[in-house]
Image (cartoon, helix red, strand yellow):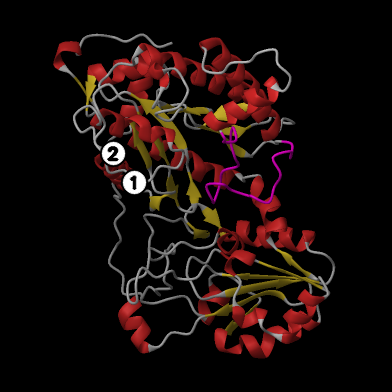
Amino acid sequence: MRILIGKVLQRISYKQNNGRRAFCTEKIVDIGQPTPSSHPELMKEGELTPGITLEEYILRRKRLLEVLPENGLAIIAAAPVKMMNDVVPYTYRQDADYSYITGCQQPGGVAVLGHECGFCMFMPEQTPQDVTWQGQNAGVNAASEVFKADKAYPMSKLREILPDIMRRSSKLFHNVQTALPTYMEMDAFQKAATSGEVKDVSILTHELRLKKSSAELKLMRESASIACQALLQTMLHSRTHPYEGMLSAKMEYECKMRGAQRMAFNPVVGGGPNASVIHYSRNDQKIKEGDLVLMDVGCEFHGYVSDLTRTWPPCGSFSSAQEELYDLILHTNKECVKLCKPGATIRQIHNFSVNMLQKGLKEIGILKEDSRRGSHHQLSRSYYQLNPTSIGHYLGMDVHDCSKVSYDHPLTSGIVITIEPGIYIPLFSNIPERYQGIGIRIEDEVLITDTGFEVLTGSIPKEVKHIESLLNNFHHGTVMKSHSSQEVSSS
């Protein structure tokens, strides 16, 4: 355990950017997002976005062309800006498919890819007032020179140019999530839609995004590492600050101080019975002495997200009922992780987890089965009331990544999934009282490798003895004086 915690705590000191620029009179062009010249401490020469080279983006477009039907056309619009009110926008996040194909992290554009037209980008046009209020954005020049579009046009030319391209195509694929009325209302698009020749481009792009490249996996490892370090600090913080809101804020602070751009989703911080609400998001209560807290968290690091969950008692020790359920979930987590290998499927792992949890809950006495006809159906129904979730999902640029890919798809090397068994017992249920109000989930990120698996979130403790030792022997990353010479043996 000492070694486990030591390795994580070695990385607690915040990374500092020590790169210094020599004095230079050359003007650096601002295209509205980092480039190697504007952010040399962040990007290497040849990279279009941090960690991903221009060559990789070109290869992605080539692969999409290979799966596009002959004479097919892909139309992918950027994510729209969403407004909090009439003048305040929410923090912008680019659509994953648009980002994957173009590398452009800004709103207002439309990318078009086809065998005949090549890679075209329609870019927004800024007024001087736009620049004053919002800063520079990538335009037509950046589309050609930076993103390497074969053809680049201002958005004002979309109605003039795109209809002809669509008319020359036999099948259209577009991003349904970000579709724009601007092109959907065009006669050429309407005609194709009426004849059933318009499909969701995600059925193609999600297959391409499923298996991660070495560059993508490097970003995902760092995203997972940041989240693990941040959650470890948050667990320590919970000893003296057992408040859902404070733990949420601590997690976000620690992630961003380590280089994450944003949280992958609003942290789930469920104390006591709030943990039985699967996607609890209020985060506004104090965690009572003796209660567990469930934290489902993740961050985004240059377009790639992490997702992990730990459940622990901020007071420092599990009750007998809590530990009994926790051990079942932990054992299920470990056994399911062992099944993660090439050829397996998420559905197979899920079915295994259901059987394992049902058996364990029957042994504990939470689920009951009798010999009456239909009892097995009733048992399954009772189980799914306590855990209606899947054992996991694909992970990558989005939290529930590649949603168009079936859970029956065989896993292959380079795919990242989550393994997250849980139990969610509400108050005032017909479950024995000692278990009521307990919610537990243990979630890890698992990379499928050629020979099996790699747990990307393995640095964060999940054994009962390790968690209790961490909470009782450490305080905000520092060994307490009374235990400074004590060594905790690793498992």
The one of 483 and 188 positioned closer to us in this rendering:
188
Q: Is residue 340 visible?
A: no
Residue 176 vertical position relative to residue 219 in the rendered view, above or below: below
Please report whichever mark, 2 or 1, sits nearer to the chain's N-terminal start.
Answer: 2
Residue 401 included in the magenta stretch of the image: yes
Work out whether 317 lies above or below 458.
above
Q: Is residue 5 above or below residue 53?
A: above
Q: Which residue is mark 2?
A: 244
Q: Which residues are magenta?
A: 388-410
Q: Nearer the viewer, residue 478 or 195?
A: 195
Q: Amino acid type of disc 2?
A: Glu
The quarter of the picture where residue 214 lies is: top right
Q: Nearer the viewer, mark 2 or mark 1?
A: 1
As measured in the structure, the alpha-carbon distance from the residue carrying label 2 to the one carrying label 1 is 9 Å
Tell me if residue 308 comes above or below residue 139 in the rendering. above
Tag 1: amino acid: Arg
Q: Position of residue 205 (x, y in %)?
A: 68, 57
| Residue for point 79% across, 81% down | 191
Q: Is residue 333 left or right of residue 285?
A: right
Q: Which residue is mark 1?
A: 282
Prevailing secondary structure of the magenta residues: loop
In-front residue for pair 259/180: 180
Q: Nearer the viewer, residue 257 or 207?
A: 207
**Percent position (x, y) of residue 418?**
56, 35
The image position of residue 102, as x and y in percent, is 58, 65
Helix, strand or loop status at disc 1: loop
* Label 1 Cα crowd, 10 Å radius (few <14 / some 14-19 / many 20+): some
Q: Is residue 456 visible?
A: yes
Q: Residue 44 at x, y = what percent?
A: 46, 55
Circle 2 packing at 10 Å, graded few (<14), some (14-19), many (20+), is many
Residue at image position (58%, 27%) is 382
Quadrant of the image containing the N terminus: top left
